[in-house]
Image (tube, grey):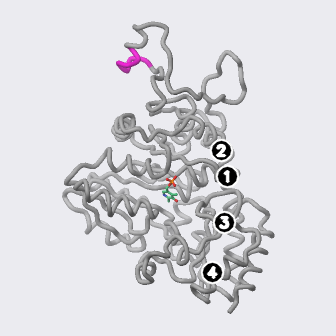
């Protein structure tokens, strides 16, 4: 857990926040690969266990590398406090478990990350926490779904994989009116492109595995927000143990130093790709938050400073063309991750969502010809050329 007082602009903070130098006077933060920390005497140890000092105790609770990462995420999100976890899922899970109890109700967007959907529908009910889903494209239906026991509203914007966008300020107003926690998964936009807390969210969850790492190396997660909420989450995590490894924190903290410049390039490449693909006759449609044709374009430009690094489109030839398209790619990688320096293509209907029936897939916006591109940092000419040649080659 960490509280911070920003001194500089967020992009500078992401670079300059640093663990205090050791007597070695290193310029770059070293790795603190240690499970526990020492005390000079029993009184200091007692005081630390009694929360009377800021010293570390054990790396399940806190660690200098993890604290550095958390401080940076707090500075970027303009959050009061935060806690870092082993993965995005443990951050989301901890935010649910620490703040809801049996008898409570969660109101969640339907279009959420697959594992989050599993937690919401399979595990929360097992512990007596009920849920309802709302449709991100119909924000006017949200308020009517609130019950007296609704404790939290959970949403991703833009959504994965459909890239729908919902007005965070609108949701925050509803949440505040009913005294409910608004929890936003900000993985897709990153704090570079939108800051949900400034729009009124009380909590922000992250998978640091994606754009934050940006190079597909380590898993990580974070939850940041209101001090009193993070206090509960910290207490839950400290005892249940989903803490981030100091090694991963070291990697991720370094990654945050380049997040702003990377997101600029991801967004520029993605917008150029989306615009070029809009002219392609093989496609039914192209979806990108910063395309004027996006159904929630007005909200996207209001609350985001860039459209992000994901572009989606629908192939006219459906499932079969989807398979041929992936096989015809020469440079783009077929892999489950996203938010990498290397461009990635995925075809949910034949891979991640193949077990669903076609009707179930359509319900979450995954049509047979739906393709998701995580646009990397390569030269846009190469990205576009590979996608265009694969579209040509996959023609029926
Ligand atoms: C990947 C992802 C998660 C889960 O993060 P992990 O680090 O894989 O546990 C949660 N939300 C979104 C939107 C994601 O893309």
Find disc 4 in the rendering and name its residue.
323
Q: Are marks 2 and 1 in contact (CB under 8 Å)?
A: yes
Nearer the observer: mark 4 or 2; the answer is: 4
Find disc 2 in the rendering and name its residue.
255
309 to the left or right of 35? right
- Residue 129's x, y, as percent? 25, 56
Circle 1: is it few (<14), some (14-19), or many (20+) Cα within 10 Å?
some
First along the sequence among labels 4 and 1:
1
Estimate the spatial distance between the alpha carbons at disc 3 and disc 4, rounded to whole Å: 15 Å
Direction bottom: furthest residue: 396
Circle 4: is it few (<14), some (14-19), or many (20+) Cα within 10 Å?
some
Find disc 3 in the rendering and name its residue.
344
- Which of the 4 image quadrants contains residue 124? bottom left
Q: Secondary structure at mark 4?
A: helix
**Count of number-bearing discs:** 4
Find disc 1 in the rendering and name its residue.
215
- Residue 197's x, y, as percent? 45, 49
Magenta part of the chain: 47-53
């Amino acid at each position: 857990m960490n509280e911070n007082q920003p001194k500089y602009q967020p992009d500078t903070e992401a670079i300059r926040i640093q663990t205090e130098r050791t007597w070695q006077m290193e310029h770059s933060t070293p790795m603190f690969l240690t499970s526990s920390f020492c005390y000079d005497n029993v009184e200091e140890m007692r005081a630390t266990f009694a929360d009377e000092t800021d010293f570390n105790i054990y790396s399940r609770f806190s660690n200098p590398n993890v604290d550095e990462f958390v401080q940076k995420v707090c500075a970027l999100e303009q959050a009061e406090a935060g806690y870092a976890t082993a993965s995005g899922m443990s951050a989301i899970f901890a935010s649910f478990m620490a703040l809801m109890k049996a008898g409570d109700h969660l109101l969640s967007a339907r279009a959420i990350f697959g594992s989050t959907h599993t937690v919401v529908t399979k595990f929360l009910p097992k512990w007596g926490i009920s849920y309802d889903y709302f449709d991100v494209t119909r924000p006017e239906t949200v308020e009517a779904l609130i019950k007296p026991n609704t404790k939290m509203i959970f949403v991703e914007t833009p959504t994965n994989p459909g890239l729908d966008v919902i007005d965070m300020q609108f949701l925050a107003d509803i949440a505040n009116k009913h005294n409910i926690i608004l929890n936003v998964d900000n993985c897709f936009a990153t704090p570079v492109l939108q800051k949900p807390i400034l729009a009124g969210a009380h909590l922000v969850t992250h998978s640091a595995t994606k754009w934050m790492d940006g190079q597909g190396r380590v898993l990580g997660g974070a939850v940041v927000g209101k001090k009193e909420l993070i206090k509960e989450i910290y207490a839950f995590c400290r005892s249940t143990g989903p803490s981030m490894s100091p090694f991963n924190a070291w990697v991720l903290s370094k990654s945050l130093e380049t997040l702003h410049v990377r997101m600029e390039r991801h967004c520029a490449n993605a917008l150029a790709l989306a615009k070029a693909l809009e002219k392609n006759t093989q496609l039914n449609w192209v979806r990108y938050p910063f395309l004027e044709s996006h159904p929630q374009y007005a909200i996207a430009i209001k609350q985001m400073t860039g459209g992000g690094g994901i572009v989606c489109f629908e192939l006219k030839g459906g499932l079969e063309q989807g398979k041929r398209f992936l096989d015809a790619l020469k440079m783009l990688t077929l892999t489950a991750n996203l938010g990498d320096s290397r461009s990635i293509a995925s075809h949910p209907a034949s891979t991640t969502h193949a077990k669903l029936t076609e009707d179930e897939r359509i319900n979450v916006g995954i049509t047979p010809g739906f393709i998701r591109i995580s646009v990397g940092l390569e030269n846009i000419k190469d990205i576009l050329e590979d996608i265009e040649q694969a579209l040509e080659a996959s023609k029926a």
